[in-house]
Image (cartoon, rainbow, N blue to C red):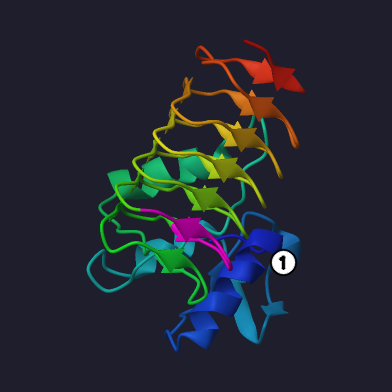
Amino acid sequence: MGAGGHARVLLDILIRQGHKIVGITSANPHDFMCRILEIPVIGSDKLIFNYRTDSVLLVNGLGMMPGKNTRCQLYEYFKGQGYTFAQVIHPSAIISSDIKILEGVQIMAGAIIQTGAVIAENTIINTRVVVDHDSFIDKHVHLATGATVAGGVSIGEGTFVGAGATIIQGIKIGAHCVVAAGAVVVRDLPDGTKLTGVRGC
């Protein structure tokens, strides 16, 4: 579901792993009849209803930008219709055997997830992200490329953590926060916080 850059990355992973892909859906009619990595865009998301809920797994190919979470809305809508979302995990990701990864989670190339971590539904762990031991990443979160989450961190629902951001150990970040690219978080952030630079002690 989705025909942009994030969807292409997911398609590349799925193709490499030999999954059978029925097709791509898109909200943009200009994408119809196109092919992405040789997979056809078959039409709008409504075409999913042509398939029984037990006959397909969905992959949420929408990315997430700060302040906008159409990705969350799409996931919740189709979950409400009884569909299931696949996990997509790049084979180069390093993942402890002692973690919990929930439905629809996407883990990209070079990511590292250490023991005791929990990654909740529909979350993106992007390229080269590090999630250290015993951290909890709530649903609909996006950890952008190269972000570092130290041990024992908690990140609330719908939060966006920008590329190269660093969150030090034990920090609690609330729901629907935005941590800008390159920011360093050294103090807890309440719900809805928008942070650039360093959050001092």
175 versus 161 height, above or below: above
Percent position (x, y) of residue 98? 25, 57
User: Which of 124 and 72 lies nearest the eye of the viewer?
Assistant: 124
Image point 75% across, 36% down: which residue?
182
Image point 59% across, 44% down: which residue?
148
- The quadrant in which residue 9 appears is bottom right
> Looking at numbered disc 1 in the image, what kind of residue is underneath it?
Asp
Percent position (x, y) of residue 138? 39, 36
Image point 48% across, 47% down: which residue?
131
51 versus 161 height, above or below: below
Percent position (x, y) of residue 195? 69, 20
Percent position (x, y) of residue 80? 29, 43
The residue wearing badge 1 is: 31
Q: SS for tag 1? A: helix
**Within 10 Å of the Cα at label 1, are there few (<14), some (14-19), or many (20+) other Cα atoms?**
many
Q: Residue 107: within the magenta?
A: yes
User: Which of 70 and 179 lies nearest the eye of the viewer?
Assistant: 179
77 versus 14 height, above or below: above
The part of the chain drawn in magenta is: 106-114
Q: Residue 147: within the magenta?
A: no
- The quadrant in which residue 70 appears is top right
